[in-house]
Amino acid sequence: MKYLVTIMIAVIFFGHVNAQKKMAVIPAGKYQPFFVTKSDKPLQVNTFKMDETAVTNLEYLEFVKTNPQWRRSKVNRLFADTNYLKYWDGDLTIGEANKNLYNSPVVYVSWFAAQAYSKWKNKKLPTVAEWEFAANAAPKNIKYKSLTDYVLDWYSKPNPPHLPNVKSTYQNVYGVYDMHGLIWEWTSNFNSFIGSSDSRGNSEADLKNFCAGGAINVGDKTDYASFLRYSFRGSLKGNYCIANLGFRCSKDLN
Amino acid sequence: MLLFCLFFFSCKTNPGNTSSENNIDTVITGTVTAELTHAPNVPKPLAYTSPKKVIVQLETIEKVMQIADSTQYTFWTFGGAVPGQFIRVRQGDLVDFTLKNAADSKNSHSIDLHAVIGPGGGADATSTAPGQSTHFQFRALHPGLYVYHCATGPVPLHIANGMYGLILVEPQGGLPKVDREYYLMQGDFYTKGKYEAKGLQDFDEEKAIAENPDYVLFNGRVRSTTGPNALPAKVGETVRLFVGNGGPNLVSSFHPIGQLFTKVYMEGGSKINTDVQTTLIPAGGAVIAEMKMQVPEVINLVDHSIFRAFHKGAVAQIKVTGNENPSIFQKIRK
């Protein structure tokens, strides 16, 4: 009997921590950065794997259980601001009131936290190029006229009172869910494209990325959805924890 | 050398054409918190006489509001309304500015105040993520009425969604006293549906690029300031209008039907013109215009590019009550 219980516990435990999150294979391709100069060539994106969905609250709970330094009361303010996991009940409880959020993306997490989580999973955060390349793929299970319109529509709506669960928007042809329409997502090099916070660029150094009127060096001036995304990333700092900002992990193929 | 000569020469020949820059060595004494008002209201004239440190806190808020009686639009705002809250400071003041972005905002925002001399008019210092805030200080060097707006990319979209307002820098000693002051701001809007099409309407990028708006509005809503919401005034009073144009595209030919402007601070600056029928307000510009109320009437304030008033909503009203003044106007009955 004792033996059986041990096995059961082992199975539950083993099953739990090893419930591998499904990853989709994103095929290699080229990504044209949003901010370009004549000399810029499209970036080569190698084949990589990407989490099917954003990291959920339940998944993140496992992380803080095994990594005490990332619990809300213990976290270093340099790595996560005072909003870190602010909607959770406590260090190790998401809370009864948040029951419908267990399978929603974890939000109010910093870039440092997302990096640490990814490392713990033996994964990494996708680069901007990887993320954008994967996100530009066409939806396969919804009707839509233009992806840009779909995305703009989401960007123009204030946050819902309760963040929906993962897989609640659409799956794209690579098999990943909710690349648009659920949350903003951290990328490993989120601020590398943005030199200035003023999108019209005032200093000479910023002219490569920005110019007066905001669009001279932009690849597609009418791609307001990408524009908003790059502006959002440009306003971030690594310790920011924000209501609609979460993450998913990626992994090199080999 | 030649440039220097030209400069010197032009200064000599136009002694009256100098800008009224403030001496920045003036000592700042005391701190006040700026009164912020929603249109059509204007903060009270400032009572202090020496430059202060003025605390201004503005919040960017994204919210669905009525653009017409049966039509809604997701506005992006400064302070929860279109136009944004009116800020009133005095020449020489040190403005301590905090921009907060509401926690439930979807997007990052910033602010470019045309009264600011410094990188991006403040935009460079205020790129603000949702739930965060940013902080900077500037010296109000030049008197005038200035537009502020969001400068986060894509700038045209942020402005088209309503992110603009006015900041008044009073000249030293303040503006002459008048009986009433009001705040109006024109803006053009681009929606998927036509003018007054029912329901929540999305932004239409193609129409915006073509500069073909469905709505040209004062204070962000059809009939914001007409009928029961008309601005009250009485015969004998002088009314001062602070009028901005947020654009993003159109230039306004601002005209009072049945009145004329006795005094116009041209382009919101220090030069005063008198007896003006229609004053031009550039996109990203403003004007201070005054009228003396002479007879009871409803004054329609319009963009005299008149199709905009007739078909796109560009009308505001002042309702003047009081005694008839037949020596100025009387209708002759047969």
Image (cartoon, coloured by chain):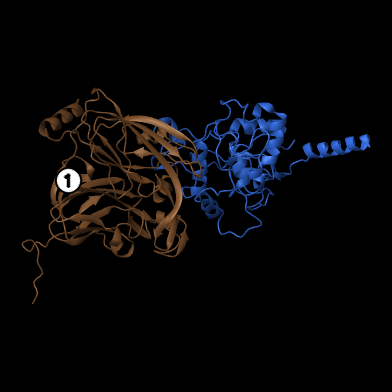
Question: Among the chains, which one is brown?
Answer: B
Q: How many marks?
A: 1
Image check: B36 left or right of A78?
left
- Image quadrant assignment for residue B57: top left
Amino acid at pointer 1? Val
Residue at coordinates 16% horizontally, 30% vertically from top-left?
B6
Element at label 1: loop
The residue at which mark 1 appears reads as B178
Image check: B47 left or right of B274?
right
Image check: A254 left or right of A196?
right
B169 vs A150, nearest the viewer: B169
Chain A: its colour in the image is: blue
Residue at coordinates 38% horizontally, 30% vertically from top-left?
B136
Instruction: Residue B291 in the image: state x and y as whole percent.
Output: 16, 52
B58 vs A206, nearest the viewer: B58
- Image quadrant assignment for residue A12: top right
Q: Quadrant of the C terminus of chain A?
A: top right
